[in-house]
């Protein structure tokens, strides 16, 4: 009986020392991107913020080779506690709650904004706001993400969306 108690005690100690598996719905990345609407091809651009639980990054590219976009990729300084708070808040939102609402008559032109949530399972949740499109319940996602992004400061070399003329 003593051996059995010792074995069970050792087993319990081993099991309690093991780290739990992260849940499959653990949010690992938040991506916000925007594409310019119908403007001159050399002025069209794609901008993207990529947030992980550890860092934030920003990138910009043009749509054609002869772009005037101030293209590049930059790491951003982000408050780790604010990042974790954002991830915790957004992680609790079920993707199934966001319902796409198409406009009866989509407007001409306009840019596109996309929010992509990537989970540990690899499954993404993507909300694409084409011109005139909304998602019911999306404010719970878009507002905290936009609030966080507005707290970030782009480096001086990234601040201007277009290159200055030589």
Image (tube, rainbow, N blue to C red):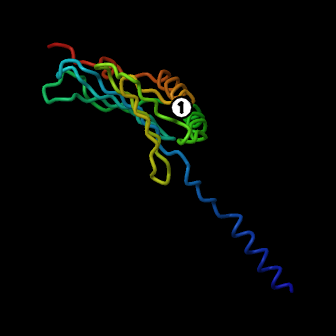
Q: Residue furthest front?
A: 104
Which residue is rendered at x = 24% and y = 18% of the image?
162
90 vs 103, left or right, is right
Above or below 58: residue 12? below
Q: Quadrant of residue 38?
A: top left
Residue 31 locus on image (x, y percent): 42, 36
15 vs 97, left or right, is right
Picture mark count: 1
Residue 161 locus on image (x, y percent): 29, 19
Above or below 26: residue 83? above
Q: Quadrant of the C terminus?
A: top left
Q: Quadrant of residue 3?
A: bottom right
135 vs 48, left or right, is right
Residue 65 locus on image (x, y percent): 14, 30
Q: Secondary structure at mark 1?
A: helix
Q: Quadrant of the N terminus?
A: bottom right
Q: Quadrant of residue 92?
A: top right
Closer to us: 62 or 111: 111
Above or below 159: residue 118? below
Q: Residues within 10 Å of mark 1 (few under 14, many from 20)?
A: many
Residue 85 locus on image (x, y percent): 60, 34
Q: Which residue is mark 1?
A: 141
166 vs 140, left or right, is left
Which residue is rendered at x = 22% and y = 18% of the image?
39
Which residue is rendered at x = 56% and y = 37% of the image?
90
């Amino acid at each position: 009986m003593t051996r059995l108690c010792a074995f069970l005690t050792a087993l319990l100690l081993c099991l309690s020392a093991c780290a739990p598996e992260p849940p499959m719905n653990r949010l690992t990345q938040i991506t916000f991107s925007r594409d310019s609407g119908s403007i001159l091809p050399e002025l069209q651009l794609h901008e993207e913020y990529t947030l992980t639980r550890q860092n934030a990054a920003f990138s910009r590219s043009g749509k054609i080779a002869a772009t005037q976009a101030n293209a590049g990729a930059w790491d951003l300084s982000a408050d780790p506690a604010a990042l974790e708070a954002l991830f915790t808040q957004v992680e609790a939102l079920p993707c199934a709650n966001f319902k796409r609402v198409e406009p009866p008559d989509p407007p001409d032109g306009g840019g596109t904004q996309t929010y992509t949530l990537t989970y540990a399972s690899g499954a993404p949740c993507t909300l694409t706001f084409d011109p005139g499109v909304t998602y019911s319940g999306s404010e719970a996602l878009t507002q905290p993400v936009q609030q966080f992004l507005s707290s970030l400061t782009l480096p001086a070399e990234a601040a201007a969306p277009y290159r200055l003329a030589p």
